[in-house]
Image (tube, grey):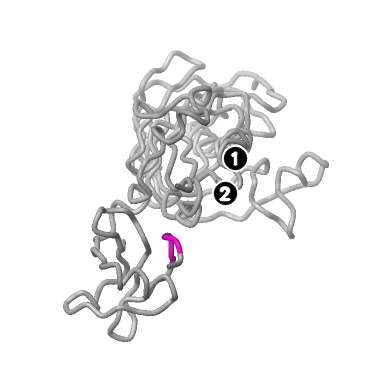
Amino acid sequence: MPYFGLLNINKPSGITSRDVVNHVQRIVRPAKAGHAGTLDPLASGVLVVCVGPATRLIDYVQQGAKRYRATFLLGRQSDTEDIEGEVTVLASAPAPTRDEIVRAAASFVGEIRQRPPAYSALKVGGRRAYDLARAGKEVELAERPVKVYSIDVLDYDYPSLSLDIRCGAGTYVRSLGRDLAASLGTAAVMSALVRTEVGSFRLEDACELEDIRGETLGDLLLPPRRAVADLPVVILTADEIHRLSHGMPVRREGLTELAEAAGCDEGGELMAILTAREGQLWPSRNLGPRA
């Protein structure tokens, strides 16, 4: 049976997210594989890799809330906003108290505006911002709204500050540390980052990269339904699955007002993402084999 599912992987630090996908891709080819949310090489933790038709669900996973354990060094700054860049120690930098940090962190909870780091994968004029920055170009990305659900101080021993951060998609933790430090009259660089959660995917449940092999992959794959766990479920008959696989709608009394739903077969396997339109349920994404 073709590979179809999700991998919750504990990405090691020191390698790229693409390296993780390439490892999986070598095992599952000719099936596709793709990750749902980049982790920088410095970072470790939860990286969800979608396999086979589940690559069509990447954006659903990416929209899940993220949780991080981040460590910063105060009184320092770098062009990359982390220790991967050229770090400069500020002269006579203030050492804020723990209470001052807690109060300042509270002001960053909610919907805030954030300027992404110059060294990021965002595109400027068709090129990656980090490519422009490495070429010596001045990169100033526009602020954008992001959501921060909570910031808690885990440990503080100046200059080292460890935070537990829960935030929405698109939030740069490096930049959050940068702005928090600036509000305290100093600067900060990120020295370590562990992603502990992506939506319902937890670090304690993640598999290690070296454990993913041809003979183990089938047991490690999680059901694609996990990517859309918040959607209501519509159980489909074989005839309905056949119609949907050919782009045709199905009618269900009482369900036509659903904005979006997970269409599953009688065994609970995800077959399609459904949307209501013109009094019928249409497939917005087909995931099962075309019958």
* Residue receiving disc 1: 25
Helix, strand or loop at label 2? It is: loop
Kind of residue sitting beneath label 1: Gln
Q: Residue furthest left?
A: 254
Q: Residue 84, position in %: x, y?
A: 67, 26
Helix, strand or loop at label 1? It is: helix
Badge 2 density bin: few <14, some 14–19, many ≥20, Cα 10 Å? some
Quadrant that contains the C terminus: bottom left
In the rendered image, residue 271 lying in the magenta stretch gets the answer no
Answer above or below: position of 12 versus 171. above
Are the residues at dot 1 and dot 2 in contact (C-beta closer than 8 Å)?
yes
Q: Residue furthest right?
A: 135
Q: Residue 185, position in %: x, y?
A: 53, 31
Q: Is residue 74 visible?
A: no
* Distance in Å between CA atoms under marks 1 and 2: 7 Å
Q: Which of 89/263 is in front?
A: 263
In the rendered image, residue 287 lying in the magenta stretch gets the answer yes
Which portion, as a residue range, is magenta? 285-289
Q: Residue 221, position in %: x, y?
A: 41, 38
Q: Main secondary structure of the magenta part?
A: loop
Q: Please give the label number shown on residue 129.
A: none
Q: Please give the label number shown on residue 32.
A: 2
Q: Quadrant of residue 96?
A: top left
Kind of residue sitting beneath label 2: Lys
Look at 31% across and 61% down and name the residue there.
262
Q: Which of 172/228 is in front?
A: 228
Q: Which of 185/269 is in front?
A: 269
Look at 47% across and 24% down and name the residue there.
208
Q: Quadrant of residue 257?
A: bottom left
User: Along the horizontal axis of the image, is 167 left or right of 22?
Assistant: left
Q: Is residue 64 visible?
A: yes
